[in-house]
Image (cartoon, rainbow, N blue to C red):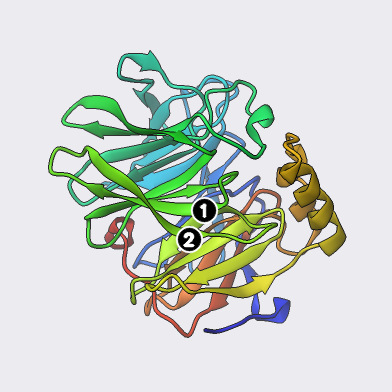
Amino acid sequence: MFTLTLDDISTIGQGMQRPECVLATKSGDLFCSDSRGGYNIVKPDGQSRFIKAIGAPDNFMPNGIALMPNRDVLAANLADSSGVWRIKPDGQASLFLDQADGVPLPPVNFVGLDTKGRIWISVSTCAVPRHPAFKKGPGDGFVAVYDQGVARIVTDGIAFTNEAIVDPTGEWLYVNETTGQSTARYAIRADASLGPRETVADYPPGTFPDGFTFDADGGILIVSVASNRIIHVDKHGKQSIVIEDADTDAVERLNAAFEQGEAVREMIEIGSKRKLRNIASIGFGGRDLQTVYMGSLSHDGIFAFRSPIKGAPLIHWGF
């Protein structure tokens, strides 16, 4: 497996605020969320254009985003106003979904589209505010699916649900559990219900998985907040650290408090003091799907590096 140094990582785009989620397309355009209440489009030459959501709540905070075939953007609203919102290319926004199984959605972490047109929604915790859930132990996160006009919860009891993405085969839903320090997957049945949880990877101390993506060989790349780690997990489950940009002492203190059952809000803070600025999402792009892009919680641009392994094209790639 390959390794990187900080010198291998460049930046594209500028002037963004909390570009937590990044999606790459075949055209070279990058779409990334922005906590100012909208999203950015970054062109191949690095020029960034901010699209402000018009008609969304004043505290609208896009976190995870999904790109639709007509280039509308679905945004998971992490603010207390919650919901999944649809933003047209001209910025006009409308509420797409605010409940599952008839129950109002708490703040929404991530939203994704699959090849059958189903929308997958992840909620990290039912706690409002969310910070008390940044601790070790059983979680109350869940995943819902919007299918044929109906939203329903398909799995719950997750330890801080983060990104939830259908794999390139369309047969599995992969889910990162941040405080569970693991990646799991669930077989997707014909009716969009899920099979039993299967563990893909349990991560070492100091790894808190947030975003991830799939390579062309059946493996995944995940990023860890706080420790600014990129970890590759191959199709056999073997893990390799590609890079880490962390304050070792700070991560050790965080991990000690976490193991003692304390709520560690520092999880979303200490990584921001390093060059990688708390990386939170990752995706393959470039014409050959060998450029890797990363969003973060604290940088104003998108990080990028060249990879010796190729990515799998996800559904938004062709939009």
Give yes or no for contact between labels 2 and 1 (Cβ–Cβ under 8 Å).
Answer: yes
Q: Earlier in the sequence, mark 2 or mark 1?
A: 1
Image coordinates of residue 156 in percent, x first then y, are: 40, 32
Callout 2 amino acid: Ala
Residue picked out by circle 2 = 201
Local secondary structure at mark 2? strand
Residue picked out by circle 1 = 182
Report the side of 273 relative to 82 (left or right).
right
Query: For this rendering, which residue is in front, 13 or 265?
Result: 265
Query: For this rendering, which residue is in front, 94 or 275?
Result: 275
Going by the picture, which residue comes out furthest to the right?
249
Residue neighbourhood size for the residue with mark 1, other residues' Cα within 10 Å, grouped as few (<14), some (14–19), many (≥20): many
Please say whether residue 41 is visible from this viewpoint.
no
> Taking 1 as reference, is 96 above or below it?
above
Going by the picture, which residue comes out furthest to the left?
190
Image coordinates of residue 316 in percent, x first then y, are: 32, 56
Residue neighbourhood size for the residue with mark 2, other residues' Cα within 10 Å, grouped as few (<14), some (14–19), many (≥20): some
